[in-house]
Structure formats: C-alpha cells, structure tokens
Amino acid sequence: MKIKALSRSKEECTRERKQDLHLVRRNLDPTLHPFEQAREYTRAVNAAKLDRMFAKPFVGALSGHADGVYCMARRSTDLKTLLSGSGDGEVKLWHIPEQKCTWSVQGHRGIVRGVCSFPQGSQFLSVGSDKTVKLWDTQRKDGLSIHEPVEVFTGNDVFTGVDHHRSRPSFATSGSKVDIWDLQHSQPIQSFSWGADTINSVKFNQTEQEVFASCGSDRSVILYDLRMSTPLAKLVTRMSTNALAWNPMEAFMFTTANEDHNCYTFDMRNMKSAVNVLKDHVSAVLDVDYSPTGQEIVTGSYDRSLRIFRNGEGHSRDIYHTKRMQRLFCVKYSMDSKFILSGSDDGNIRLWKSKASEKLGPINYRERAHLQYSEKLKERYEHMPEVRRVVK
C-alpha cells in the first residue's frame, strides 16, 4: 500500500529576497471574505456615479429640413439609411454615419404624413395631405430621373399614415378608412372601417405578417387580418391614441402612445386591460417605437422630451432633451439598438446614444469585462438608497 503525503519546501512558501516574510495562501472563495458585500456596495456606488458622470447621449443633428419633421422610417436590412418627411412636403434620405443628406425631393404639396421603406431594394413610399401615395426609387435603372416618382396612387381622402407588408408587394394606408393596396393596381384591393372618422396610424405586425393594427380619432385601437374581410377586434381607450408599435420579439404584444401622457402595452389575445402602463411624460405622447431586441421602448412627447423605458417597467430609465428641441413628432431606434433618432418641430433630426454613457469606438477585452462587471454590480445593489438616488 502506497501512502501519499503533502509536502512543501521552505523555498516555495517564502519570498525570494526576504526569507523572514512567509507567503500567505489566499482563499479565493468569495463566501469566506468578511467584507465582500461592503466592498461590492462601494464599487456599485462608484459605478453608478461614473455612469452619470460620463452620460453624454447627444451624438449629432441631421439638419436640412426647413419645416418640422413629422415622420421617419428605417430600412430593416440597412443600418446606415434613414427616411424622413417634413411639413413642407420634402422627403429626404440620410446617411447616418456621415450625418448628411444623400437624396432629397419635393414629394408632396403640404405635410408628408408618413413614409415607409420596402424590406428589400431601394424603393420606398410616402403619403401626404395632397391625397396621393408616391412610390420612389433612389436607384432607378430605367433611365428616368430618380427625383420623379415611379408610381402615383390617388385616394379620395387625406392620408395619415402608411406601412408596408414584410414579404408581399402590398401596403396599407390610413385616412378616413384603412386601405390595402397592391403595387400592380391603381385602386385599393381591400378596405376596412369600423366607426372612426379619421385613422391616425396603421402598423403591420412584423412577425404575424397578415395581422395589422390601427388607432383612430374615436379613441379606438382596431386589429385586422388580411385573411378576413372584416376587422378582428376593437379596443376603446379613455383618450385618443396617436401612434402604436408592435414588439418585434413577441408577436402578440403592442404599445400605444396616448393623449393622456401615458403609453399602454396590450396583449392582443386579451385586451380587457393593459399589461403595462408607461408613465412619466407630462404631455401627450406622439410617437412610440420598440428596439429591434424588444427589450426597450422609446417615446417622444409634446413636452419636448424623449424617454427610454425597459420593457415591463412602468417608469423611464432615462430622459433626453435639449434647450433648442421642440415638440417631438417621431422617434426611431436604429437597427442595431445602439442609437435613437428623434424628429422634432424645429426641423432637426437628432441622433442619440441609447445608453447615455456608452463608449463609441473599439473596446478591448479587459475594458468590456470591467463594464459588464459594473453593470452587474448596479443591478445587484439597485435597491440600495444611495445607488438608486445616483441612478435616478
């Protein structure tokens, strides 16, 4: 039978130069450290202070519109481009990294009420108060000018919004009723109405592609299905709804921007009551948008501020505003969830970081690990009074 015994030499347990100083063995088990919580709490407070100290969310402004920016649209397959429409009928295409306009046209007589891009290609749609829907192509190959519309669809009433189907060559417009158009036909192929004098907005669900929703002037939110000839369901709120947005990750969830200073998240499977209420605005909320990850919601309000909410929480985690920024008519997340774009009444499109203190540019491994550790510390001690006070 062999017996093994632990043996350590004197040289291994002492330092090289001073033989009288013995090496102390560390026990790396965090549960045995007597001051672990106090040490981490101090680090959490410092991390919260540094986060607020380096909070500089404003990146830049895309200036060029002569009137207020009333609508914006992003392209789902492109991180760099943004569409915008203003109150003087001008439609612009922006290159976000360079913060400059790459294409511009006087598209409509009067206000541009809505713009939307095609899922693929360089085409997009715009609607205006001149009762027309115009199809544009910034890279036309038929020899004609890129500043002339490819197609013009004429309606009987003023259009207030437009949205494109994710996979089919069809789109929906809102006005006195909701119309479904096909690019091969000059007239609507389908129409829906349910009591409202004016439909403020219409949005397709990006996951359940045949389902879409609209909000009307009679305080209603209505769900539709392209496979049916009549609307699906109707919800009546206390005050009028200005805009709505679908959660890109949970197909049955959507959020509405309301006149009563709040946003309401509903589950379309059971709309008897709101799943969540987003508070903190002090005036009517004019637009709402989900981040592509579905984890955060951004809202723009008549009170000249932009607020960011975590999905499932009732109060905003951050508020952005500047002294020169006027009423916000439209807000959008970028497709990488790192930036937010806001269009306001002063004719500017402002570019913000979604995380105010996030560093722009390359981050090495050690710095990224440190930032992740700081975030976990703030999450762990967010209920403590000092950390909560600094974060708020």
Image: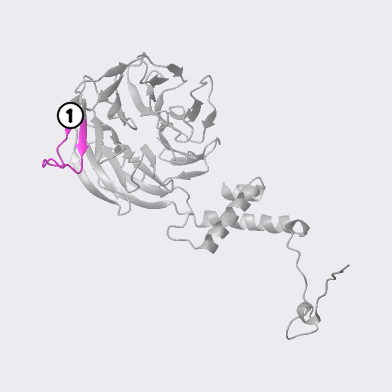
Q: Is residue 172 something one can see in this rendering?
A: yes
Quarter holding residue 202: top left
Q: Nearer the viewer, residue 145 or 119?
A: 119
On the image, the x and y values in percent for residue 392 come to 56, 46
The image shows residue 269, relative to residue 293, as above or below, that is above
Q: Which residues are magenta?
A: 134-151
Residue at screen point 72% across, 55% down? 37
State how the image is colored.
one colour
Label the magenta part by its dominant secondary structure.
Answer: loop
Please name the residue shown 21% across and 46% down the image.
103
Along the line of sight, which residue is nearer the eye, 88 or 44?
44
Which residue type does callout 1 highlight? Val
Residue 292 x/y as whole percent = 43, 41
Q: Is residue 347 visible?
A: no
Rendering quarter of residue 90: top left
Q: Residue furthest front?
A: 1
- Where does the image place residue 239, in percent across and percent down from the top left? 44, 22
Q: Is residue 207 magenta?
A: no
Using a 10 Å C-alpha cutoff, classify the residue at mark 1 as few (fewer than 14 neighbours), some (14 to 19) or many (20 or more): some
Above or below, 224 against 358 in this view is above
| Circle count | 1
- Left or right, 104 with respect to 281, comes to left
- For disc 1, the marked residue is 152
Residue 351, placed above or below residue 215: below
Q: Residue furthest right?
A: 1
Q: Secondary structure at mark 1?
A: strand
Dividing the picture into quadrants, the one containing residue 28 is bottom right
Residue farthest left in this picture:
143
Percent from the top left, x then y, of residue 41?
68, 55
Side of 373 relative to 228 (left or right):
right
Quadrant the N terminus occupies: bottom right
